[in-house]
Each structure stands twice: as structure tokens, then as C-alpha cells.
């Protein structure tokens, strides 16, 4: 497995693979890889002849007061994980390689991004769509892998690919969790021991809400209230949002039906903003 830092080197590798008739999968990441990322890489390895993992902390998707500078980085550990998982190439560019001087083209989206994380993080999805678009143009993969952990991101990328007629299959992969239920995240490393304990309330509230819906509850307000009450039992938890939306439109719903996304974002101890969710397809009967 190779690590390359330039777009030119990625293209040379991919060109050679294409000459050999090989299929190519892409797993975009910001690095500090854990078992969640690993599950995406392994799925990509199982479904493609060659897999490119990008490791790039994309400055464009961070707001001015967010954690760009402190975001954890460890390319040596990342490359060990990628190699063991069967990846063929890591693309690890510097910001200047991705954003040359004079850079001024962006991929922006309306609608789907005016909800959930898009409201709390106004520049986030413009940065995500732009960098994902660039990565697609650089690697030109057959398939690209994204986690359901970032459910809105997955919906946004699927929509972008459809709207802009990109010939790439977007594969969503299930959320990988710690033993106590907390969704794995590079940002979990920000948590102090006490915050880490209290962070379990995110997944607990998600599991509880999912069970309420599976048991037949269809009133979104009731489910959200139960979640808010549960999360608020933890003194270090500060809710950003608790929402139930239609997964196709990201619009809030009152009655739970169709394809729904229940998503939450919670600040824990002022140390980390964590997200979690569940998705369900319900018959409208
Ligand atoms: P990130 O490095 O946080 O930008 O994540 C890169 C990709 O890994 C995204 O598609 C995430 O949704 C996915 N991912 C991150 N954490 C998890 C997890 N716990 N389970 C599944 N996928 C994940």
C-alpha cells in the first residue's frame, strides 16, 4: 500500500488500475481512523479490486470557531489500519494541494442542508460537497463509501451525485459503536473520563426512541420529548438539536411515517459536539 500526497500521483495509480480493467472504490475520511472507518474500508475492499482511502482534514468544512486546529491526527496509525484492512492507496494531501491559491469554485446545496447540522454549522455542507466533489473528480471511483453515522451527509452526497449526474454508486454503511453504545468518533478522544461516561446518553436516547417507534408511537413530539428528558438527566449534556425528519427532504415531521431519520447533536461537557441517529422505513398504513 502506498501513501501519496499529490493529485498527480493518485491519477497515475488509478490510470494504471483502469488499464488493467480493475474497479476502484473510494473511502473519504478525515483520518484518526477507528473501527467505524475500518468497516467502510473493509466493505470497499470486498466490493472493489482497488480501494483509495483519503485522509484529509478539510478546512473548508469547519466554521471559524470549530475544532480544525485541534482535530486529532495520526497518519502512521491510519496507514497501519488501512494496510491491515486491505486498502491499496492512501491519499493524504496538504490543504494547499486541494485548495490552490485563487481557489473560488464551490458546490453548494439548498434544502437538504437547511436542517439539522446545516443549521448549527452553516458552512459545513458547502465544504463537504466541495471536497467530496473534488475527491470524486480526482479518483473517479466506481463506488464511494459513507457512514450512516453522518446520516445527513450521506443524504446530501447521494442527492449531489443524482443532481449532478455523477456516475458513482454511493454506499451507506451502518454505525459502528463502542461496547456501551456510544457511536465511534474521532471526536470521542476530546472527552474527559466523566464526559465519556455521560456521553452514553446519546445512544441510550436513540435506542429508546427507536424502540418507542417500533412499539407503534407515531407522534414525533412525544418521542422527541422523551429523548430530551432522558438526555437532560446528564448534567454535562447540552442539546444542540433533537429532530425527527423525512430522510428525503430533511423536513421536520409531526407524524412518524415513511422513511424517517431521527437525529441528535449534543455538546458534552463543552468538550465535544457529538451526533447520533437512527433511520427507519415505515409503511404508511
Ligand atoms: P470522518 O473521518 O469523521 O469524516 O468520517 C469518515 C467516514 O467514516 C464518514 O463517511 C463517516 O460517516 C464514517 N464514520 C465515522 N464514524 C463512523 C461510525 N462510528 N460508524 C460508521 N461509519 C462511521
Image: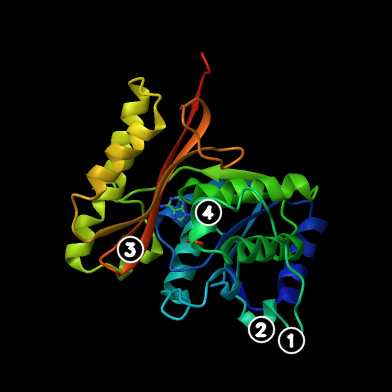
113 to the left or right of 83: right
Say if residue 179 shows up in the picture: no
Does residue 32 lie above or below 110 as drawn? Answer: below
Query: Which mark sits nearer the N-terminus, 3 or 1?
Result: 1
Q: Residue at x 47, y 75 (%)?
A: 75
What is the tally of numbered marks visible in this picture? Answer: 4
> Looking at this view, is 61 or 178 the one in front?
61
Mark found first going from the N terminus, 2 or 4: 4
Q: Which residue is mark 4?
A: 41
Among the 4 quarters of the image, the one containing residue 258: top right
Element type at mark 2:
helix
How crowded pointer 4 is (Cα within 10 Å; few <14, some 14-19, many 20+) is rated as: many
**Mark 1 Cβ inside 8 Å of ligand 1:** no
- Identify the residue shown where x is 18% and y is 49%: 233
Give the mark nearer the N terminus: 2 vs 3. 2
According to the picture, the residue beneath numbered tag 2 turns out to be 96
Q: Is residue 63 above or below residue 156?
A: below
Q: Which residue is mark 1?
A: 101
Give left or right: position of 14 versus 259. Answer: right
* Image-quadrant location for residue 223: top left
Q: Nearer the viewer, residue 60 or 99?
A: 60
Q: Secondary structure at mark 3?
A: helix
Q: Position of residue 112 (x, y in %)?
A: 62, 48
> Separation of disc 4 and disc 1 at Cα?
32 Å
**Residue 39 or residue 154, whichever sits in front:** 154
Q: Answer yes or no: do the residues labelled 1 and 2 have beta carbons within 8 Å?
A: yes
- Determine whether the residue tagged by mark 4 lies in a helix, strand or loop: helix
Q: Nearer the viewer, mark 2 or mark 4?
A: 2
In the image, which disc is placed on residue 188?
A: 3
Q: Earlier in the sequence, mark 4 or mark 3?
A: 4
Amino acid at each position: 500500500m502506498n501513501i501519496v500526497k499529490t493529485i498527480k500521483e493518485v491519477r497515475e495509480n488509478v490510470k494504471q488500475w483502469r488499464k488493467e480493467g480493475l474497479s476502484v472504490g473510494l473511502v473519504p475520511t478525515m483520518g484518526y481512523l477507528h473501527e467505524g472507518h475500518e468497516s467502510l474500508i473493509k466493505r470497499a475492499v470486498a466490493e472493489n479490486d482497488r480501494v483509495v482511502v483519503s485522509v484529509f482534514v478539510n478546512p473548508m468544512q469547519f466554521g471559524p470557531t470549530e475544532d480544525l486546529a485541534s482535530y486529532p491526527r495520526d497518519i502512521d496509525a491510519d496507514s497501519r489500519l488501512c494496510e491491515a484492512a486491505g486498502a491499496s492507496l492512501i491519499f493524504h494531501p496538504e490543504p494547499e494541494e486541494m485548495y490552490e491559491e485563487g481557489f473560488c469554485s464551490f458546490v453548494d446545496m439548498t434544502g437538504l442542508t437547511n436542517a439539522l447540522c446545516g443549521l448549527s454549522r452553516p458552512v459545513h455542507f458547502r465544504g463537504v460537497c466541495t471536497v467530496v466533489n473534488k475527491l470524486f473528480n480526482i479518483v473517479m471511483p466506481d463506488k464511494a463509501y459513507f457512514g450512516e453515522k453522518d446520516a445527513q451527509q450521506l443524504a446530501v452526497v447521494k442527492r449531489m451525485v443524482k443532481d449532478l449526474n455523477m456516475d458513482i454508486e454511493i454506499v451507506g454503511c451502518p454505525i459502528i459503536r463502542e461496547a456501551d453504545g456510544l457511536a465511534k468518533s474521532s471526536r470521542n478522544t476530546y472527552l474527559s473520563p466523566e464526559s465519556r461516561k455521560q456521553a452514553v446518553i446519546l445512544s441510550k436516547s436513540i435506542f429508546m426512541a427507536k424502540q418507542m417507534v417500533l412499539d407503534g408511537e407515531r407522534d414525533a413530539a412525544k418521542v422527541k420529548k422523551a429523548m430530551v428528558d432522558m438526555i437532560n438527566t446528564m448534567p454535562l449534556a447540552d442539546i444542540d438539536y433533537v429532530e425527527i425528519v423525512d430522510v428525503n427532504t430533511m423536513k421536520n415531521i409531526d407524524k412518524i411515517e415513511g422513511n424517517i431519520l431521527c437525529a441528535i447533536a449534543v455538546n458534552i461537557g463543552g468538550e465535544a459536539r457529538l451526533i447520533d441517529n437512527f433511520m427507519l422505513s415505515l409503511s404508511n398504513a
